[in-house]
Image (tube, grey):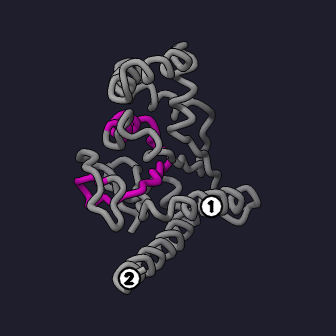
Amino acid sequence: MTALASRRTQLAQQQFQHKCATLIERLADPDFLAVRGLGNEVGLFMFCYDPALELQARSFLTHIAEEAQAGRLPCCIQERNLFDILLELCEEEEILEDLVQLEAEEGTQSLLEEIKSIITPNMFAQRIAEGDFSPGDVVVVTGVGEVYPIARAHAILNNIQHIFPENPVVLFYPGSFDGQTLSLFTGESAGVGDGNYYRAFNLI
């Protein structure tokens, strides 16, 4: 590893640890949990991280969920994984087995187009919204990188922005967000353009 790559890795780790500490602080903040103080904006928050730290992000989510369950955080973490939702929807539409044959015969691009023509962003949003939500619940959406390009983050956000008026939604995002532009898989590479969205807040 070159000195520059080592420095980038160290910086990514430092930024990640800072973001983790910040999210824990927010999860203990009554105003955050009640979606107060946003000036009539929706409570959508971006937890961005270097995609190389995906396993650490998953471990961190497990940690905060356990902390909340043990009563050491005054909230309840409700995770919604987009890849799990995708598989469930494909099974319900009875297309899962056919997709394997489609990819073998017509290629990956045809497979992706077929899935996108059947599974819409609104279907993802409705599945995310399923369940009982109480004050103090935090909805954490994961699996963004796993479902790209079938589902795009900006489309998911557009479809859930009015579903949770009383609960914060945190999108675990392996990329970057500058308050307008989403860029997936940013790290050592330039990343992939993932659309624009204007109503979410960076946690940092």
Residue bearing mark 1: 59
Instruction: Kindly identify the residue that appears in the image at 33 percent across and 28 percent down.
Output: 109
Q: Nearer the viewer, mark 1 or mark 2?
A: 2
Q: Which residue is outermost to the right?
A: 70
Viewer-closest of 123 and 77: 123
Q: Is residue 37 above or below residue 18?
A: above
Residue 56 x %, y %: 57, 64
Q: Is residue 199 left or right of residue 167?
A: left
- Circle number at residue 2: 2
Residue 143 appears in the figure? yes
- Residue type marked 2: Thr
Instruction: Kindly identify the residue that appears in the image at 48 percent across and 27 percent down.
Output: 126
Viewer-closest of 135 and 161: 161
Q: Is residue 103 above or below residue 42?
A: above
Q: Secondary structure at mark 2?
A: loop
Q: Quadrant of the C terminus?
A: bottom left
Q: Which residue is outermost to the bottom?
A: 3
10 Å neighbourhood of mark 1: few (<14), some, or many (≥20)? Answer: few
Q: Quadrant of the N terminus?
A: bottom left
Q: Is residue 128 left or right of residue 116?
A: right
Viewer-closest of 179 and 17: 17
Rounded to the nearest angstrom, the CA distance separating label 1 from label 2 is 27 Å
Q: Which residue range is magenta in the image? A: 155-183
